Amino acid sequence: MSPTLLFTFVIGYFLLLLVVAYYTSRKANNDSFFIGNRSSNWMLVAFGMIGTSLSGVTFVSVPGTVGLGGLQYFQVVIGYFLGYLVIAYVLLPIYYKMNLTSIYNYLSHRFGMVSYKTGATYFLLSRTLGATARMFLVVNILQIFILNSMGVPFWLTSLIILLLILLYTFEGGVKTIVYTDTLQTSFMLIGLVVCIFAVISKLDLSFTSAIGQMSDAGMTKMFNTDYKAPNFFLKSILGGAFITIAMTGLDQEMMQKNISVRTLKDSQKNVITLSVILLFVNLLFLLMGGLLYLYAAENNLTFKGDDLFPAIALGSYLSVAIGVIFIIGLISALFPSADGALTALTSSFCIDILGLKRRKDLSEKQGRKIRLIVHFSFAIIFFLCVMFFRWINDKSIIDVILKFAGYTYGPLLGLFAFGILTKRKIRDKYALYVCLIAPVLVIGLDVINNPEWFAGRFGMAESNAKSLLDMSAHMFFGFKIGIELLILNGLLTFLGLYLISYKEKAAS
């Protein structure tokens, strides 16, 4: 397939985004950038958030999981649905009642400034790592299938894409992203459906017979009943629920779009609509994965994991049109996560760390200048992180994202849970220490329990990995910690906060 042809469509797609950004960012101010002037249409937000929630990782990695675990990833998706219910009926009412621009302001009202800035800092770290891991995956595919043959180095590809994202987000922020995300989600879902029909057609199967063949190949198993396994169904469902609560409900990027909706009721409709749609969309991605593995087996192809979908779609196996549709769908999956993250990180740093909203001495013009400097600074940080993931070069990036989320979102989960579920006050100056100790303990436990995961990614010596494997087998009796790592981290944080807490004296 011609790299030049694919590159032409990529450039055309960017130009379309710039046109949308131009029209939506006119007369934009700082409030437009941070919360879209609280005038976003809930239906547009709900539809656009599909793309943000899924990203390029879902587009590529989720189909790749089917060959190893069948439909077991859907256990996690069921958990996502439960997590969205908690967001809609527990978290959103709090955010709207307090009229928050940054959701981490809740922590300042509940505990104090140290907790507030600790929560915001963990968000900055979490979202930076998650967004750049997702970005790496898509940039790497563009590099391999288009830009390597044109002599463009990886670092330059990453830099150009970040500059293009800056171009269409630096002025309008959330106000622009609500519209661009809607456009990109449309392209992504259209691309997915077209690719499913194309592969079914190539296999010369009906939908029913394709499902039958997937079942014969052992790819329709959905629930794992082995309680020792990292993907045991109860662990996966609970883990998925808490991942959604933490990575969506306690995440400024995701919530700033929700709180940009005019009323709480509309925002709740947005979240519930999103949760139902995501059940069906993730099922489609898993179906796509099963079809791709059937196609690979029929044609003696050895692709698997993150390589499977792009290799078949962009190789000589399907039509040129499918290759173009795949590329458009892929970059449509990338940008809702990358542009939203860049905007949300800028918003959080300006509001939570620099206190832009609290400073009455700054004019709109001065605030805008600070915001632009922060926005460009985060673009540089994104670039460095993408190069870090290039160095790791993991073949299943979804595992890396969920692992890092377990480390970095745990303190956020513990802070908000303690604030909502108890009425106790904490000694705020010690909150940072609790939020540092809990993830360090969890990381240490995870290295001992899953040494093979770290050995394969960070070059651990084989002798050290074997020693840790032997230790793990004796300590945990074969039990493997999986997606519930986030819950454990949050629980340790909660317990630590309890130790530094006290009952507030009743007013006499």
Image (cartoon, helix red, strand yellow):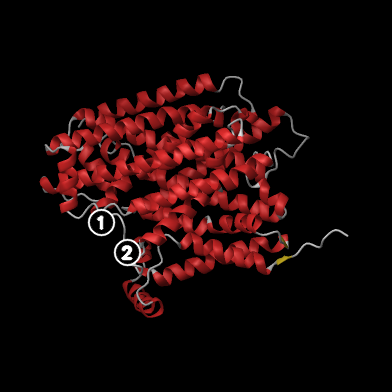
User: On the picture, is 15 further left or further right than 28?
Assistant: left
Q: Quadrant of the N terminus?
A: top left
Name the residue located 31 percent from the left edge and 38 percent from the top edge: 142
User: On the picture, is 172 further left or further right than 52?
Assistant: right
Using the rendered image of the protein, determine whether residue 128 is visible from the camera's viewpoint.
Answer: no
Question: Quarter-wise, where is residue 288 in the image?
Answer: top left
User: On the picture, is 41 further left or further right than 160?
Assistant: right
Q: Earlier in the sequence, mark 1 or mark 2?
A: 1
Q: Which mark is residue 306?
A: none
* Depth check, front residue: 363 or 177: 177
Could you tell me residue 83's position as x and y percent?
49, 50
Name the residue located 36 percent from the left edge and 60 percent from the top edge: 233
Q: Which residue is mark 2?
A: 225
Q: What amino acid type is highlighted by mark number 2?
A: Thr
Could you tell me residue 281's position as x and y percent?
35, 40
* Depth check, front residue: 403 or 162: 403
Identify whether 331 is placed above or below 411.
Answer: above
Question: Quarter-wise, where is residue 172 in the image?
Answer: top right
Spatial CA span between label 1 and label 2: 16 Å
User: On the picture, is 21 further left or further right than 55?
Assistant: right
Could you tell me residue 221's position as x and y percent?
26, 55
- Helix, strand, or loop for circle 1? helix
Q: Which mark is residue 68?
A: 1
Crowd rating for badge 2 (residues with CA inside 10 Å; few <14, some 14–19, many 20+): few
Q: Quadrant of the C terminus?
A: bottom right
- Helix, strand, or loop for circle 2? loop
Outermost bottom residue: 474
Could you tell me residue 198's position as x and y percent?
20, 33
Q: What amino acid type is highlighted by mark number 1?
A: Leu
Indicate which label's residue lies in the foreground, 1 or 2. 2
Crowd rating for badge 1 (residues with CA inside 10 Å; few <14, some 14–19, many 20+): few
